Image (tube, rainbow, N blue to C red):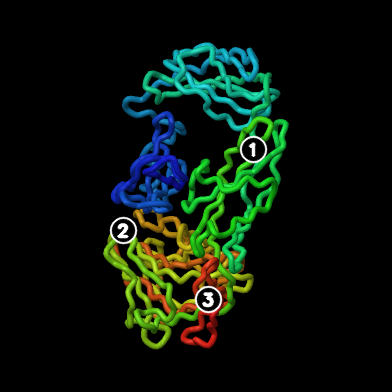
Amino acid sequence: LWVHWATDPPGPFTVPGVTEPGSSGSPLFDSNRRFIGQLHGGASACGQTGDNLSDMYGRVSVSWTGGGTDSTRLSNWLDAGNTGVMTVDGSNACVSPGSPVIGTATATAPNTIQVTFDDGTPSSASFDVYRAQGTCASPGAFVAIAASIAGSPYTDSTVSGGTTYAYVVKGKDATGGCISAESSCVQATATGACTLAPTFAGITSATNEATAGCGIEIGWGAATPSCGGPVTFQVYRSTTSGFVPSPATLIASPTASPYTDAEPALVSGTTYYYVVRSTDSSNTSQDTNSAQIGVAPTGPIAQGNLTETFEGGGGFDNAGWTHAALAGANDWTLSTAQSQTPIHSWFSDSLPSVSHRVLVSPTFAVSATSTLSFWHTFAFENTTSCFDAGTLEISINGGGSWTVLPDANFTAGGFTGTVSTAWSSPIAGLRAWCNGTIGPFTQVTANLASFAGQTNVKLRWHAGDDSSVEATGWFVDSVTLANVGSASSCNDATTVFIGNFETGDTSLWSPHP
């Protein structure tokens, strides 16, 4: 179970707080204050941002019988008598109230349904009311619409006329931590005006037009009105991933898909994030979908190859390469200890403490024939289990966010394991290269066609160490990106150069207005 934390809700992640190194084994509780999982690892720590504000928790249900020996199975310690008991309450255990006895749901006025219920035994100090769209026999998802109310009746004044709603109630003790089983269900059909928003999935595409003037074409599917219609659309834009649409980020209200966002509002190479929502004109209700796509505008794209031997000045033949230590003292360094090309490679030296570092490629555009090749040799901690390791990640928004390159993309030399979650590795749970012995370089090849059409792509070699033991590390050399694009700038009055990435071949570059 991946848990994403946040220090600034509301946002894409909405649970405030972080864990720190050394928290492994700390518990995850359910609403009844029962221990249901334990922290295995993750990158979360004070100062982390974005995807690094995450941790991986293991389920007690898996650890119960999933250990390799008697001493590592929780059942041998917590149910040695094999009683089969499914829950055990510890000290200060709560006694859940009795399930409330449901009464009626009645449309008492336009856009109003009143729900009645009686207290259960043992009695509750307060009640939560849950509602689903649909009937009791076939409801949608129940969501809480009222919390900690004193008792019956509850009046729901947020219903849409003509729509049937189902209701259940739960009771809580005085602490709010002990919750009853839910009541049985009642339903009613609301009267009054139809107030529902359209049914709409949101944005489906955002494509760089790759023309001299910056342009991004936004696309979306149909919206179905729940009330009278007609439906209108609103396009929102931000440079912040996970932004919440607001009047300040509204850029257009087109009547149909597609819509082209064009200069002078756009800046070449900047990643823009888009959300499209729908509104029913008959009642001004807007849907709340959060579908979002990011893309960067560029000028025309010229196809070619990026060939990188790491023999140029500063360790790179081509501009745009970067490297950084994300945590810990060690960064990638230029090395002559091992190489596939004549002299140099880039080296990630492992540490016996939680740390990670990245080697990042220049930005490029991907076509249907784009491929990757590189050479490496590595020796990570442990020859059998995957603790310290290295993975290859891809970004389609210029480094704003990263995902591991899928196993299916590799055509040779793919990942050898999945990083253990037991020792707080920053890349815990990711597919990666594990184990190994330093020796002759081996080649890795991959097909990038699944990312065709993306124009703001980067790759990064991401090495991660857990909280103990170290081995040699990871050497990477001789990277070739074949049939990739080099994008010129758009909407720029200055002279721009386009061409391919062939090292040192300036004859392949030509001025472009």
Across and down, in percent, residue 234 comes to: 61, 44
Q: Quadrant of residue 253?
A: top right
Asked if residue 463 lies left or right of residue 199, the reply is left
Q: Nearer the viewer, residue 295 or 145?
A: 295
**Numbered mark located on residue 354 in the image:** 2
Is 69 rendered above or below residue 316?
above
Asked if residue 354 lies left or right of residue 497, the reply is left
Asked if residue 422 lies left or right of residue 416, the reply is left
Q: Nearer the viewer, residue 395 or 191?
A: 191
Distance CA(mark 3)–CA(mark 1): 44 Å
Instruction: Return the disc, 2 or 1, that comes first in the chain's sequence.
Output: 1
Across and down, in percent, residue 118 comes to: 53, 11
The single residue placed furthest to the front in the displayed view is 493
Across and down, in percent, residue 304 comes to: 57, 79
Q: Nearer the viewer, residue 192 or 262?
A: 262
Instruction: Return the disc, 3 or 1, that comes first in the chain's sequence.
Output: 1
Q: Nearer the viewer, residue 89 or 293?
A: 293
Q: Is residue 79 visible?
A: no
Is 71 rendered above or below residue 435?
above
Amino acid on which disc 1 is placed: Thr
Asked if residue 116 lies left or right of residue 22, the reply is right
Q: How many marks?
A: 3
Q: Residue at x 62, y 23 (%)?
A: 159
Kind of element beneath mark 2? loop
Kind of element beneath mark 1? strand
**Numbered mark located on residue 279 in the image:** 1
Instruction: Return the disc, 2 or 3, that comes first in the chain's sequence.
Output: 2
- Contact between labelled residues 3 and 2, with CB atoms less than 8 Å apart: no
Across and down, in percent, residue 421 comes to: 40, 54
